[in-house]
Image: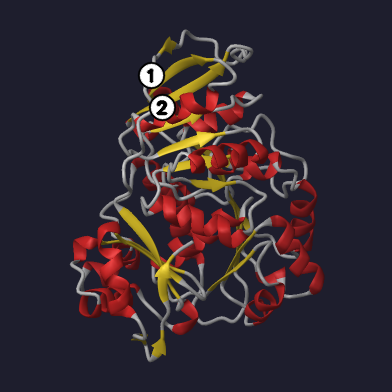
Amino acid sequence: MSETTKNPITQYLRNLSIESLNEMQSEFISRASKNAHLVLLAPTGSGKTIAFLIPLITALQENIRVVQALIIVPTRELAIQIEQVFKGLKTPFRVSTVYGGHSSKIESQSLGEAPDVIIGTPGRLNDHLERGSFDPSSVRTVILDEFDKSLEMGFQGQLKAIFKSMSGEPRFLLTSATALKKMPDFIPFSDYRTVNFLRDEVESKLELRLIHCSSKEKGETLMRLVAGFQNESCIVFCNHRDAVDRLSTLLTDYDYSHSVLHGGLEQIDREKNLIRFRSRVTNLLIATDLASRGLDIPEIKQIVHYQLPPKEDAFIHRNGRTARMHAEGKAYLILANDESLPEYVDRFVEEEKVNEKLTPPIRQEWICLYFSVGKKDKVSKGDLVGLLTKKGELKSDEIGLITIMDFASYVAVKSNLVQKLLPKLKNERVKKTKVKVEEAN
């Protein structure tokens, strides 16, 4: 009997190209096999999704047509991300995802087939429970991912209603990027154990740098700063969506390629902007604190606080996007002359001078292509790679990140090849479906 046959978890991890679990994941999975209710405290980006999905999968039963588990998350992006990881494990279990900005009718149809696992935001899950879209009495496991963020966003009422709807006594696995001073009264369990890996944050090699400028020159100072990063990925944080939009307009005027992310964007635009950033089509993301946690964004070497947040928690979570798990990183604080450092920055911050000359941005290496086929057309990454290599005559190293959504797909390709590539793909088919290919907006 092979190792894979003996231990299906090994194969699940291989399906995600994961060779081994990190220390936090191993300890949590081990503890989860022995404890009923468990709380995981770990930094953003440390691998909490795998840590809770493995115990969840282990607890699921095959071939029973009932909802066995709920994964409750604070944001749409996190719901989509967890769904992608779950499907990437290639288990025999079915999953459905529900969130605002998504078709309720399509969701209801999917829930009517009783998926094994439902991933959703508190508001949308509560809506489906009120409509009777699924029966919660069979739920045996509840994951509360980024629970502290759900509390920050005011989902207490919806969570309370969800818990009240459950007639059974499910097991709870809760994750948080910050230690909770007190567990809320509406949580339906009191006896639990904690796995605490927040101590790793103390060992972070994050460097803070302070940049002074006048109020009028703040935008230009930012551009001079990011131009010096030589196309390394960077997230610029603002406190409000209006500030993100104003900064985006300025960057566009100066031909700085970038993506934006805030709660005022349509869901499809949020997803496309994140795809462009993950694919390195753009290396600059201008965002509100929506980007500070819970998103599958690769390691970032530079964080810029264009506006410093009023609360320390937000500052910590923003900085958590870099210098993760002992890696090195820098966080820049841009401070106009009429602004002052908040009290929570209580240590000396070394001042840094930026290049006085505004250099033009470096040409982007990748461009994102849109394909008019997706999961609903049974299209795989291999199908798209086949089209690009056979018909498009691309080499494998000229194809970047591939993202397949329900009704569309996005592929990063080398920007200098696009002009010759698109005519070769005109009127081609994928899985017998005629596909439209164009540069993504």
Instruction: Tell me what residue is drawn at x 40 percent, y 31 percent.
Output: 226
Horizontal placement of 12 versus 374: left or right? left
Q: Residue at x 23, y 62 (%)?
A: 398
Can you say which quadrant of the picture contains the N terminus?
A: bottom left
Depth order, front residue of 230/305: 230
In percent of width and height, residue 94 lies at 51, 75
**How far apart are the two marked residues, 2 and 1, measured between alpha carbons?**
7 Å
Q: Which mark is residue 224?
A: 2
Amino acid under disc 2? Arg
Place residue 312 in its image quadrant.
Answer: top right
Q: How many labels, in total?
A: 2
Q: Nearer the viewer, residue 386 or 435?
A: 435
Residue 49 coordinates in the image, percent (x, y): 47, 52
Residue 367 percent across, percent down from the top left: 35, 58
Q: Is residue 28 above or below residue 330?
A: below
**Which residue is drawn at the image coordinates 47% and 58% (left, top)?**
53
Name the residue beneath numbered marker 1. 356
Residue that protrudes farthest toward the bottom in the picture: 432
Q: Is residue 134 visible?
A: no
Badge 2 crowding class, 10 Å Cα cut-off, few under 14, some 14 to 19, many 20 or more, is: some
Q: Are marks 2 and 1 in contact (CB under 8 Å)?
A: yes
Q: Sequence-wise, which precedes: disc 2 or disc 1?
A: 2
Task: Give the image quarter of residue 109.
Answer: bottom right
Mark 1, secondary structure of its residue: loop
Q: Is residue 228 left or right of residue 237?
A: left
- Image position of 14 (left or right of 101): left
Type of amino acid under label 1: Glu
The residue shown at (33%, 39%) is 231
Question: For residue 400, which quarter of the picture?
Answer: bottom left
Nearest to the observer: residue 344 or residue 431:
431
In what element is the residue under mark 2?
helix
